[in-house]
Amino acid sequence: MATARDGCAASLPYEMIMEVLQWLPIKSVFRFRAVCRSPAALLSSDEFRRLHMAAAKAARRAGPPAQLAARRPAPPAKLIYISPTATFDSTAVYSCSFSRSSSSGRPRDRGDLLFTIDGARGNCVEVVTPAPCHGLTLLYDALDTAYYICNAATRAATRLPPSAIRGSKSTAGLGFDAHTDEHKVVRLINGLVHERDLKLRRPSHVSGHQAPPASWLASSGEQLMEMDEQLCLVRNRIPHGSNTLEIWKLLDYSSGDWLLNHQINLSGHLARDLRQSQILRVIGSFRSYRSTRKKIIITTSMHKIFNKYQKMVHTYDPRSEALETILSITETHSIPQYACPSSRFGFIQETLAPVHRTDEALSSDLAKVTREILLRLPAKSAILSKFVCKQWFRLIESENFIWSYFQHKNMDKRPKVMLVVKSTGQLGFSFTPLNKCLQEAPSHSTLLDTKVVCSKPCHGLNLVSTETKDYLCNPCTGFHRVYRNLGPNLHLPSRMPKAEEHAFTVGNKNVGLTFSPSTRQHVIVEIFYHRKDFKSRQYDMTCALYWCNSWSAAQQISVPPLPVNDMPPAYVEGVLYWMSEPRLGQCCEWTIVSFNLAKRTFDVVPCP
């Protein structure tokens, strides 16, 4: 069988070719792969990849003086950071050098775009491992609870298969198994039912100052990191009244001896942004290829105003104690229920570490063809196609496919009218097309026994409300989910008089269905009346939110500024609108009450 070795030119020994090519930069390696099949096979082999990674590691360890005599100097250290795209449905990965802008001398406000990761929600993606593990970086999407592996040097990324175990709290790390030459992601899951106790042992003695506590007992001001290929712990003293950062180095793993390696003073004027930041993280250190002096990298994140967040990168020189801001970017977020990620920054490591496709992934060409076919199927047929194979299941279940399917099926914007009729199924009702009802003879068996109120479609879903329950339904696929009203509201002392009931009255509530474009989640907004007295104009109400993609309990929010009547609300681009009830409260005029989901605030709109 022909190998990469056999295809090499006969004029040069194979060992000499490998000795020369292993010192090439990654960009040059990719160019050589495009020459012909023989170099492509050679430069894609596992043997060459290992040699290239070893050569790059040796160049980094050698330092600038030794690099002058080396065959290939280590490439300049670079930073990567991730940022949401304009549509919030993908994440952009940028690179940036560890220096200020050469033209203005001010901190950079942007980097160079490397690639984008489709499906990763940029608002909620964070860098789990700022220091690459043999060239690879682990990312986490908090909204979709998904992990991604990427190699910024080769601009490759892949999503890991979902875990079969879902824990209430979990953490993950990326490691490398030298025996199998494989990267592995390890998750520690602390579930609500199956919990494991950790027996901690305090070290008997330490060198330097007092030893820092174990990472799992540390407060939010302490973090673990890798620096100079040693385990370090960063202790943030700012919350405790001392404007300092301590960096401890673990000297001996067996005895647990720690040494206070650096103590950074943040009391100066230049460190104001670090002191005021909501999130502060030390991600590592670097040495310039022109100097042997080490600089420590500190990243910060701070909420500025409304949905604007400022992300900054600072360098600290331990010798001169100089602090410099090299990158300052402002991002737009629109995620109401998630805080800004803990870190969006990391290092780029020039290696050819491969990013293999998982077993769940389809090839790019096949995925595109399959996707286009499935987008044209009826909803029920698309649902049944999930059971063809694992790849189709993941494709159809993905958020991107669901969103694309919705847009594709509603391009013509022709409404499809359906009626809610009586059914013998679990729900007690079902959806029937209007044309079918008109063609068939009317029958009392199709009439509902109880009053229900059905909302207009909100991004493909309808909300059917009864006196005690709300049903989130997809009439096209048969999907439904039941939401019960809050317990205390089911035991009100009295109901409204029948004469006062509106045609849309279902119990003591008014329910609306809205949608968050940034998170692609449906949200139920329920307003409950505990009291209605039209004679005294007195009323008492509460308001709650149900996030439909979460099984967590309802979240109580502030009540509307004015009471609303029994008419269901209208939904327009993330905002619900109710008509006020002029018979209650101090206002006797008709007014529109609005609720903005992104801001979670009520407002009043005057009527024309």
Image (cartoon, rainbow, N blue to C red):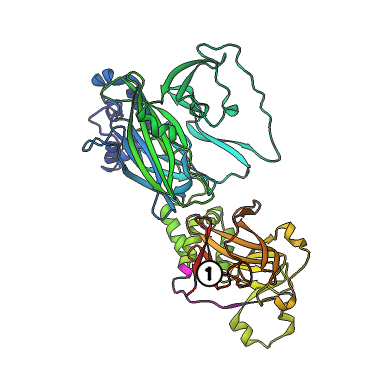
Q: Quadrant of residue 27?
A: top left
The image position of residue 455, as x and y in percent, is 59, 71
Q: Is residue 471 above or below residue 435?
A: above
Estimate how packed mark 1 is, as few (under 14), some (14 to 19) or many (20 or more) residues with alpha carbons within 10 Å. Answer: some
Is there any visible trace of residue 302 in the rendered image? yes
The image position of residue 534, as x and y in percent, is 68, 71
Q: Quadrant of residue 450?
A: bottom right
Residue beneath disc 1: 592
Q: Is residue 130 above or below residue 89?
A: above
Q: Which residues are magenta?
A: 408-418
Q: Secondary structure at mark 1?
A: strand
Q: Mark 1 belongs to which amino acid?
A: Ile
Q: In the picture provided, is 64 more to the left or to the right than 366?
A: left
Query: What type of secondary structure mainly makes up the magenta span?
Result: loop
Is there any visible trace of residue 3 in the rendered image? no
Residue lying furthest left in this view? 103
